[in-house]
Amino acid sequence: MIGRERLTAPFFWFADVFAQHEWRTRPGFSAARRTISGNLNVVIALGFRAAVLRKHCARFPLELNAGSMASVTAPPQSVAPLALHASVPSIVRIEPPRGWLELRLAEVWEYRELLFFFVWRDIKIRYAQTVIGVIWVVLQPLMTMGVFTIFFGRLAKLPSQGLPYPVFYFAALVPWAYFSQALTNCTNIVVDNQNVITKVYFPRLILPLGAVCFGLLDFVIGLVVMVVLTLSFGIHLPATVLLLPVLILLAVLTALGVGLWTSALNALYRDVRAVIPFVVQFWMLASPVAYPSFLVPQRWRWLYGLNPMAGVIDGFRWALTGHGQPPGSAMLASAVMVGLVLVGGLFFFQRMETAIADRV
């Protein structure tokens, strides 16, 4: 049994330091604060959580089950017996899941503020010491749109469903840029946070969730630019634009489902990091980014519909411009495929969670 002072002392120290106002007013504190790494936000969040639990640890001992780093479970005792028998010690064990079907999503919800700290840390790190800041979010898809317009539009003269080439390509690049960035970040998130994983406990599912949510800021900025671009070409937004939240949710779940598989595999086999860029490039060519989906032969449509991003990209073009056919069967096939990948990814990631801390 590990004493509670030894286990929780680092968290209590951070909580006490940042809770006292006089530390914030001492000379040199502002300069020292700027030198602290973004990882400190995670420690602060865990410190405040530990401070909340300190009153419980002061009365009850804490036991750590050796070799277990997957979940925190409390004994099945009601509040009333604890109040009546305060002198009886309570044991909290950290133990791995007992089977493939044990997801423990309620525990992820309890650590939701830690998810916010992870996302906020990544945003600050990305835009710190940049000259033009968020303009990069707009500049990159605009440059890609220009290249596609010149080579695939003007030179190759691929059909654009009656849309101007800039609108046709940018409507596909906005969801695709989010998906590719979220998938890449999600793949590397476990390995990049190995110092945190091997030192403190929290639900590891927070990491891929934070990587997926981090890209939503860039996605919203790109979506605003897309609306402005569409209106500048004289295309009025149809009523189908109200379906965009459904399509955004489908894109987020696609990135999360695939990212759960790749992040767990990357923690076990580092070859995955080198393979992902090729997979992203191949996936873009297999999605209707540079061409309309009706160019795919009819006999291969069922196979093409298994690509979740095909339905998302076609749906974005249709919802924003009203051009093209509604992605009915393709969207249904994409939704079914996303559900299977997401559920399988959750079970696989949860199962590999017990070995991640030892392998990263």
Image (cartoon, helix red, strand yellow):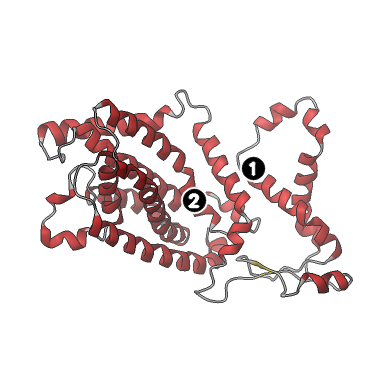
Q: Quadrant of residue 136?
A: top left
Q: Amino acid at mark 2?
A: Ile
- Whole-percent x, y for residue 75 in the image: 72, 73
- Whole-percent x, y for residue 130 in the image: 48, 27
Q: Is residue 8 left or right of residue 243?
A: right
* Residue at the outermost right position: 87
Q: Quadrant of residue 269?
A: bottom left
**Residue 12 to residue 140: above or below:** below
Residue 138 appearing in the image: yes
Which mark's residue is nearer the viewer, 2 or 1?
Answer: 1
What is the crowding at mark 1: few (fewer than 14 residues within 10 Å), some, or many (at least 20)? some
Q: Quadrant of residue 54?
A: bottom right
Can you tell which mark lies on residue 189?
2
- Tag 2 secondary structure: helix
Measure the alpha-carbon separation of dots 2 and 1. 16 Å
Q: Amino acid at mark 1?
A: Asn
Q: Residue at x 24, y 28 (%)?
A: 234
* Residue at the outermost front position: 239
Which callout, 2 or 1, points at the residue further toward the start of the chain?
Answer: 1
Can you tell which mark lies on residue 41?
1
